[in-house]
Amino acid sequence: MSQPPPRRKRTRPSNIEGDAPSSNRTTDLRDEDRIQALVKDAEFWFEDGSIILIAGDVVFRVYKGVLASASPVFADMFSLPTPGPRPAVDGCPVVNLQDSADDVRRLLRLVMPKNGACVLEDLNMLDISAGVRLGHKYQMDTVVKRLAARLGQYYTKHWAGWRDPSRSSFPECLRGTAAIAVVNIARLTDELWLLPAALFECLELPTLALLSGFKRGDGTVEHLSHEDLARCIDARPIVKRDEIISAIDYVFDYDLKKCANDDSDRCYATLHALQQDPGFLYHDYQPYRDFTQRKHSWSKRVRPSLCGGCYHAVVEREEEGCKLFFKNLPVYFGLEIRAWGKV
Ligand SMILES: [Zn+2]
């Protein structure tokens, strides 16, 4: 049985205000006045709640015990007599957070879902981004691990996952520019195995989209670090080059002597025609893309013209190229990922 990871040293995040010295803290009365002036969150304001959270101009009233059980940071804060949150409004301690209200709301949906269960498959990237960033900050390790595992269904480190046709049905909202947030999540949480597939997704973005970043739910925009941006830009031409080399290796160099068909000239002519078609090399042949999409591009076109033996042989060779690419995927970005590419 594996041992649980050592718990990180508990620290009070600097953005949680507990009791402050009386000289620079508000009074209970001022807390009440202040809360009255704020917007009560429509989703997370429970009349019997036991803790008040303030984020931006929104105030939440939720359950202290649930928060404490999910987060050792909150648990420690609630357990400390001084400094700690003090009774302020209706007997509820008040905690001022520096996080955006949108982030806090999305985190609360994960920690205390109103319909009784949080369905991972229903989460969009705004939810996952907020959940991971705040989950990491408040040491909600289970939340962070579950969200990273959800991302790992697409941003996989396993060959079997990469080639799984179901990968192409992963929600669009978790792909494209969302990959920028995934890269940053990998960096923040040290889940570095997410990086190669996420950086590859970024590499395929139009340059303007890559530079424009990912817009969070609260309207702020996050970008790749300069280092990760450089990794994508530098890798682009090398990936394209290697795709072309792969085409030559696995399709054009296919040994037609293996053709068992009497009409092997027809197979030769088909492959030769591909060789003469620049569009094939630059657009159609995509051994590095999604497995299902590949099967519907060039191979579909040549399927009627090649004999069955040659068709399957060439498709198999294309998959060999894809497997080799996946094995080397971290290398394109100058990364070394432990246990990368295992089944
Ligand atoms: Zn043939």
Image: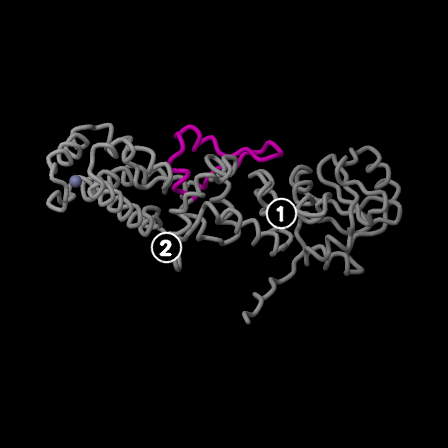
- Badge 1 local density, few (<14 within 10 Å), some, or many (20+)? some
Q: Give the SS element for disc 1.
A: helix
205 vs 230, nearest the viewer:
205
- Amino acid bearing label 1: Leu
Q: Quadrant of the C terminus?
A: bottom left
Q: In the image, is 190 to the left or to the right of 159?
A: right
Q: Looking at the picture, how far across and down is residue 147, in whole percent?
A: 56, 49
Q: State the mark number for residue 86.
A: none
Pick the quarter of the image with the N terminus.
bottom right
Q: Which residue is mark 2?
A: 341
Query: Viewer-proximal residue, 305 or 277?
Result: 305
Query: What colour scheme has been applied to the protein in the rendered image?
Result: one colour
Q: Which residue is mark 1?
A: 134
Query: Is 161 displayed left or right of 216 in the figure?
Result: left
Observer-side mark, 1 or 2, equals 2
| Measured Cα–Cα span from mark 1 to mark 2 | 30 Å
Residue at horizontal 66%, vertical 45%? Answer: 107
Place of residue 173 in the rendered image (x, y in percent of width and height, measured from the top left): 52, 35
Question: Which quadrant of the frame does ligand 1 lie within?
Answer: top left
Kindly give the residue lying farthest to the bottom in the view shown: 1
Q: Tell me the kind of residue under disc 2.
A: Gly
**Which residue does the image show at 61% across and 34% down from the upper left?**
217
Across and down, in percent, residue 245 comes to 21, 41
Q: Quadrant of residue 284?
A: top left
The reply to whether the C-beta atoms of the residues labelled 1 and 2 are less than 8 Å apart is no
Does the beta carbon of the residue at mark 1 sit less than 8 Å from ligand 1? no
Q: Is mark 2 within 8 Å of ligand 1?
A: no
- Residue 80 in the image: x percent, y percent? 77, 60
User: Farthest residue in the front direction?
Assistant: 262
Q: Which residues are magenta?
A: 198-225
Numbered circles on residues, count: 2
